[in-house]
Image (cartoon, grey):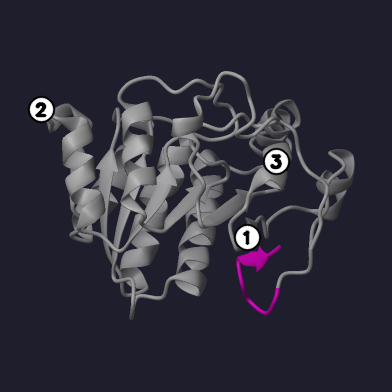
Amino acid sequence: MSLRVLGAKAAASLDKELMSTQGFSLDQLMELAGLSVAQAVYKTYPPKSYKKVLILSGPGNNGGDGLVAARHLKLMGYHPSVFYFIKSAKFEKLEIQLHSFGIPLYLSTDSQDVVGDIKRLVMSHDSIIDALFGFSFRPPLRDPYNQVIKGLIASGKPVISVDMPTGWDVDEGPRAAAIPQDEVLEPSVLVSLTAPKPASVYFKGKYHYLGGRFISEAIAQKYNFDVPQYPDLDQVVRL
């Protein structure tokens, strides 16, 4: 399925409009995004074979989506763990929920060796959710994130990227001049949110999903992107 893409400026503008004239809260949008990610994981890597999921959550809203996904994955029968970079006060309630569900939460501020600790966690889990950076990121990655991505690449573990593979440029993808080639993450699954971003054309993995079953046709027309037909009660559609 081929859909029109949504550039970084348009995506940022759309987010602002969703949380103003359209009446959505940030909490609502992250809940929908996190549920979409969890459902995509379930469809691709079911808990019977991929029980242990590690979520790498970054400092922004992409990381918040990862925190939400962890809770839904727990309810779907997985054993999720979260490594959380740079806690945000606006996500305190999500942290409380993780503790309430007994989901292990590792904080970068508690670690003496972030890269080493993540490498050990990666090797003890069946799949990894990359919720580090989203469409607003501009390469290159800085330490320790670049080392984390190198470790993910070397691990060979299945990686599910949320909206944009960490380290990619939203327009040029992995081809941006600022990206060292040994830091190009090639996830096996990409979960685009609201609408695919331009860089999604460079995605080589087998499973590309869209999570955006909350957008009105009027808004989609205004921002010139497509709302596909979602199957049954699913929150995601495979592209």
Q: Quadrant of the C terminus?
A: bottom right
Nearer-the-camera pick, 227 or 145: 145
What element does badge 2 sit on? loop
**Residue 81 falls in image quadrant:** bottom left
What residue range appears in magenta? 231-239
Kind of residue at disc 1:
Tyr
Q: Main secondary structure of the magenta part?
A: loop
What element does badge 1 sit on? strand
Q: Say above or below: 228 vs 153.
A: below
Q: Quadrant of the N terminus?
A: bottom right
Nearer-the-camera pick, 28 or 78: 78
Kind of residue at disc 3:
Lys
- Indicate yes or no whether the magenta region holds residue 166: no
Q: Which residue is mark 2?
A: 112
Q: Look at 59% across and 63% down and name the residue there.
A: 207
**Residue 158 falls in image quadrant:** bottom left
Q: Look at 23% across and 61% down and name the residue there.
A: 101
User: Between disc 2 and disc 1, whose residue precedes?
Assistant: 2
| Mark 2–mark 3 distance (CA, rounded to whole Å) | 36 Å
Kind of residue at disc 2:
Gln
Q: Which residue is mark 3?
A: 197
